[in-house]
Amino acid sequence: MTTAASASLMSFARGSGRGGAVHLDPVTLALALGIVLLGLVMVTSASVSIASQESGQPFYYLERQLLLTLIGAGCAALLFSVPTELIERAAVPLLAIGVGLLVIVLVPGLGHAVNGSRRWLRLAGGNFQVSELARVLVLIYIASYAVRRETQLRESLAGLVKPLGLLFAVRRPCCSPPGLDFSSWPARGCAM
């Protein structure tokens, strides 16, 4: 692919070549909807008896998961309306927020441990797993880095070492379960 064609494609992907119309990929949308529905079925089948015993409502966890799914879909629609250029400019502050949140959960009294893992904050009567948000914010930064340093990534190993170093630095709080030592890391890998 020529440089001009690549630049034209990148311009289209960033939104400036699309005009005002919103294009939703039907395959991606169908896959995402299928994953959500599969997750709802799994939550329901795994929790009907537990919810019935605990609360007397067999679909308690399904209703809760549906509410959280609707909140997530609303947040996704809101984020979808944000211009890509704005997200790219905010990548560094978002990374700082993600790393800051990972540090905050380590502070006794602020961070909350669940099953031996200190990755949770208590917010509004519920628990919030900071590492999940940090993963997304790190990936936003790496995507922004890849756009800004495309030539460096293609031409030298040094361009690739920087984002890999960032992934290595945040892998422990984001990926590893408690008690997992470094020796098993190469064998199992880390899916960010």
Image (cartoon, rainbow, N blue to C red):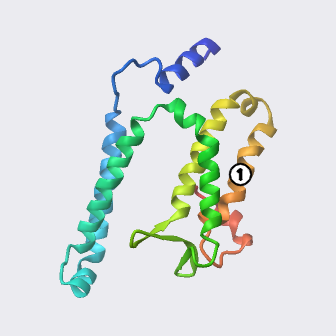
Q: Determine the image quadrant of residue 1.
A: top right
Q: Residue at x 54, y 76 (%)?
A: 112
Residue at the farthest bottom position: 53
Q: Residue at x 60, y 41 (%)?
A: 91
Which residue is nearer to you in this view: 39 or 74?
74
Q: Residue at x 62, y 45 (%)?
A: 93
Tell me the amino acid under the disc marked 1. Answer: Leu
- Residue 56 as seen in the image, left or right of residue 119: left
- Residue 182 as seen in the image, left or right of residue 84: right
Q: Residue at x 36, y 20 (%)?
A: 20
Which residue is nearer to you in this view: 5 or 126?
126
Q: Secondary structure at mark 1?
A: helix
Residue, disc 1? 166
- Residue 177 as seen in the image, left or right of residue 183: left
In the image, residue 111 lies at what x, y percent? Answer: 57, 73
Look at the picture and state if 87 lies above or below 96. above
In the image, residue 53 lies at what x, y percent? Answer: 23, 87
